[in-house]
Amino acid sequence: MFESLSALPADPILGLLTQFRADNNSNKVDLGVGVYKDPQGHTPILDCVKIAEQRRTDAEDTKVYIGPTGSANFNQLMTELAFGHDHPALLANRIRTVSTPGGTGALRVAADFIKRCNPNAVLWVSDPTWANHTGLFEAAGITVKTYPYYDYDSKTLKFQQMIDALKQISKDDVVLLHACCHNPSGMDLTNDQWDEVISVTAHQGFTPLIDMAYQGFGVGVNEDAYGVRQMAAAVENMILCSSCSKNFGLYRERIGACSIIGKDSAQTDIAFSVLLYVIRCIYSMPPAHGAAIVETILADDSLKQQWLDELTVMRDRINGNRQMLVDKLIENGVDRDFSFIAKQKGMFSFLGVNPNQVEVLKKDFSIYMVGSSRISIAGISEANVDYLAKSIASVI
Ligand code: LMR
C-alpha cells in the first residue's frame, strides 16, 4: 500500500529545527521556529510554571480520564483571560471553551467543527498567514482562500484592500484573523482598524475565527485581546483558538483552548455538543498536565502576578531585540531602511531579503530563517547580533 506514496518536503518551519541542530558552526543563529529564547539562547521554564508544576505533582491523585472538554476550571480561567471576566457574551452564557492539545489542536477542532456547520464554507486567511494554517484546514476538507493583508514593499498593511475583500465574503464563510502579533508579518491591526473589521464582519455576517497564539507578547494580555473582546460583543457566532505554548512557555506540553460563541445559550449548547463529537473523533480527550499548570497559575493571585511579570520580561526582551538589530544594521553600514522591524509586534518580522539570500545566509553563515525571510526575533541576542548584522550586510 505504501508504494503509492511519494516523499513530502520537510515542514517549512519545523524542518529548520533539524537542520539547525545538525549544524556544527559555533556562530550559528536560529531565527526559525517561534520560541522565546533568553540572552543565552535557551528557552527557559518560567519560574511560575515550576512552582505550579510542583504543586500539581504534589496534589495529583489520579490519572483517570478527564473527558473531551478537559478541565472545567482551566476552561473557565482561559475564557476569562481571553474575553475578560465580565464580557457580555460570558455573562449571557454564550461561550463554551474546551482544552485542546496546543493551539494547533484548537485550530484542527475548529476546522472539523466548521466542516460540520457548513461543508461548503470557505476559510479566508490573510496573505500571508502562518504556514500551517492552509494545510491544517485543507486537511479537514475546507477550501482556503486569501484576503490581502501585508504589503512586502511598503512594510505596511493593505488595510483598504483587506476591507474591500472582506466586503465580498458571504455569510456562509469563515474569516481567520490573528488576534495580535501577526504571524509571520508582525503587523497588527490598530484598535481603530479592528473596529472597522468588526463592523464589516457584523454587516456581512460571516463567522470570524480568531487565532490568539501570542496573547501578552504584543502590548499586554488585555490590550492584545482588544479585537477578540470587541468582536465577541458584536457578532452572533465566533470561534477563538488560543495557545499557552508561548505565553506560558509550555510548548511541548501541548495546551491551548478552543472557544465557541453562539447567538444564545440554547444555540451554544447545540453547537457545543457538535464540538464534543468532533473532539471525540480526533483525539478523544486532551492531555491534562499543561492545563493543570495553567489553571494553578491563573487561579492564584500571586502566581498570576508572577506570570504577568515573567511575560513582561519576555515581551520587553523581544522588543529590545528588534531595536538592537535595527541599530546594528545601521552601525554596519546598511543603508536600506529596516526601521519597520522596531515598529512591528510579537515574535516575527519579515527581514525582506529574497529566497536566494535566505539560502546564502543559511549555507554560508549558518543563519536559519523561514524561506519567506520570516525571522523569529527572540533568536537575536547581544552575543549574536553583531555577526547577524554583518552577515545580512554582506548579502544585501
Ligand atoms: C511558528 O510559527 O514558528 C510557531 O507557531 C511554531 C510552529 O508550530 O510553527
Image (cartoon, rainbow, N blue to C red):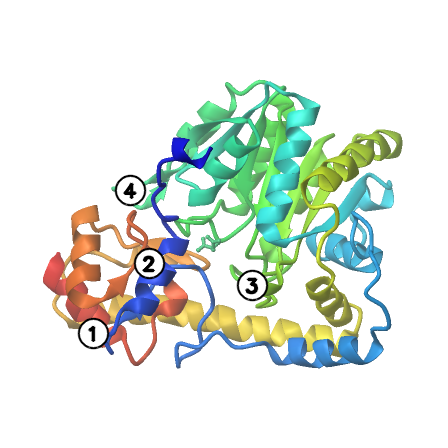
Which comes before the other along the chain, label 2 or label 3? Answer: 3
Is 320 drawn above or below residue 103 in the view shown? below
Can the viewer see residue 342?
Answer: no
Relative height, residue 298 to residue 208 (above, below): below
Q: Earlier in the sequence, mark 4 or mark 1?
A: 4
* Some atom of ligand 1 lies within 8 Å of the CB belonging to the residue at label 1: no
Q: Is residue 185 above or below residue 394?
A: above
Question: Horizontal placement of 103 versus 2: left or right?
Answer: right
Q: Is residue 159 left or right of residue 47?
A: left
Camera-nearest label, 3 or 4:
3
Instruction: Decide which of 351, 283 is in the foreground and name it.
Output: 283
Disc 2 C-beta below 8 A from ligand 1: no
Q: Label 1, on which residue?
A: 387
Residue type, mark 1 in image: Tyr
Identify the secondary structure beneath mark 1.
Answer: helix
Residue bearing mark 2: 341
Which of the two discs, 1 and 3, sits closer to the camera?
3
Which residue was labeled with disc 4?
A: 152
First in sequence, mark 1 or 2: give its number.
2
> How many residues crowd around disc 2 within 10 Å: few (fewer than 14), some, or many (20 or more)?
many
- Per the image, label 3 sits on a secondary structure element best described as helix
Residue labelled with disc 3: 251
* Viewer-closest of 63 and 241: 63
Q: Under tag 4, what secondary structure?
A: loop
